[in-house]
Amino acid sequence: MKKLYILAFSLYASTSFAQTALKAQAAKKADALEAKVIAWRRDFHANPELGNHETRTAGIIAAHLKALGIEVKTGVAKTGVVGVLKGGKPGPVVALRADMDGLPVTERVNIPFASKIKSTYNNAEVGVMHACGHDTHVSILMGVAEVLSGMKNVLHGTVKFIFQPAEEGAPFGEEGGAELMIKEGVLENPKVDAIFGLHINAQTEVGKITYRPGGTMAAVNDMQIVVKGKQAHGAYPWSSVDPIVVSAQIINSLQTIVSRNINVTENAAVVTIGSINGGNRSNIIPEQVTMLGTLRALSAADEKTLIERVKTIATKTAEAAGATAEVKIPLSVRYPVTYNDPKLTEKMLPTLQATAGAANVLLRPAVTGAEDFSFFQEKIPGLFIFLGGMPKGQDPLKTAAHHTPDFYIDESGFTLGVKALCNLTLDYMAGK
């Protein structure tokens, strides 16, 4: 028994030493790639492309992966790129994902590589900007591909690099993003065991990583409520069924859903009306009002509650006033909860702590923003983390938010992102 114990310990120590050496090798390669990753990012930042139109970006990615000897498939979910790196030893299949699309935002940041690109969005000319950091995600994953491809012979498994279009949503009337990639089989052939992703964060200090097990980002549903009444002269409102008054009553009543139907001690939720349109003159009560809004929830049960309550409140409030309300949820977009598998998160937390330093890996609160990485997590265990991109010493309450013209990222944190994704891959493979 003692000999068996000594042998087992010896094997464990040998494996642990080999794993440490492997990660040290990956870290050295990542450090050497820093300037290259930053150069990629600046090029992508200066040349952003909207969702389902990321053709230039995809071309650069595909050429890079092919040059590394990685098997490449293009045109996945319209413009997506998937690379498959088969390691020299048997093991699990790990997927790593980066999103590629920019946003219809005109850049205001004074940097040499600021975007001057314009495009068409919803039939209007718009500026285009990487105002959420997807240029960063692509560049980091390209760096990861270069590091891991150079270690191909010692990899215990296969790495699938997923470069995804249209995370911010496909153009109206089109499919796109993670959901379409899954439909087209991105998680199969070979079948993926686990997936990792990261998102740069402009309100988290550079050098830090944040995470949360379970629901970390919200499910989102956009919605449309059309209230139909009876038109009349504004001087004779008793002749009307006023859809504006009914809409006001609906909006006020919707605010009670979160305060009275959601257990806010467990999860946050949001019901927002962002647009209301009806009428065209001061003295005409219109026949119809159209409202647009968004619902956010951090559990599947809360998502269901929000949808049911909105439909009930809108239709019954309208009915009580002699009007009608038609509710469409979702109107065009639905993302599930971004749910970090608790077991996978617990298993990989030591990897993150060893990579960034335990003091720099922080538990974050859930947020009501949304991410279509959640579609992957519905199918397989996944872990989605946040990488610091705020310059050291700045106030997160005063830094420019994501999706704004002044969004800014400190590039000195990119190497930590490369190391984190490499180490998550290597340690997951070793654990299997």
Image: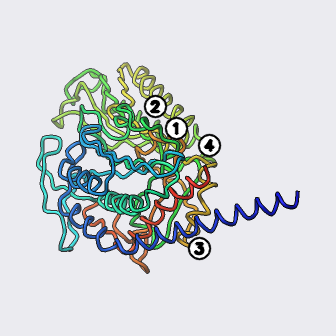
Numbered mark located on residue 244 in the image: none
Q: Nearer the viewer, residue 405 or 346?
A: 346
Residue at which label 4 appears: 263
Residue at which label 2 appears: 310
Q: Label 4 is placed on what type of residue?
A: Asn
| SS class, disc 4 | loop
Q: Label 2 is placed on what type of residue?
A: Val
Which callout, 3 or 1, points at the residue further toward the start of the chain? 1
Whole-Å distance between the Cαs marked 2 and 1? 8 Å
Whole-Å distance between the Cαs marked 3 and 1? 39 Å
- Image quarter where the N terminus lies is bottom right
Numbered mark located on residue 359 in the image: 3
Q: Are marks 3 and 1 in contact (CB under 8 Å)?
A: no
Colour theme: rainbow
Give the residue displayed 52% in from the left and 38% down from the top.
Answer: 257
Q: Label 1 is placed on what type of residue?
A: Ile
Residue 26 visible in the displayed image:
yes
Which callout, 2 or 3, points at the residue further toward the start of the chain? 2
Which callout, 4 or 1, points at the residue further toward the start of the chain? 1
Q: Are marks 4 and 3 in contact (CB under 8 Å)?
A: no
Crowding at label 1, few (<14), some or many (≥20) Cα neighbours within 10 Å? some
Which callout, 4 or 3, points at the residue further toward the start of the chain? 4
Numbered mark located on residue 257 in the image: 1
| SS class, disc 1 | helix
Whole-Å distance between the Cαs marked 4 and 1? 10 Å
Give the residue displayed 33% in from the left and 31% down from the top.
Answer: 331
Give the residue displayed 19% in from the left and 55% down from the top.
Answer: 128
Which callout, 4 or 2, points at the residue further toward the start of the chain? 4
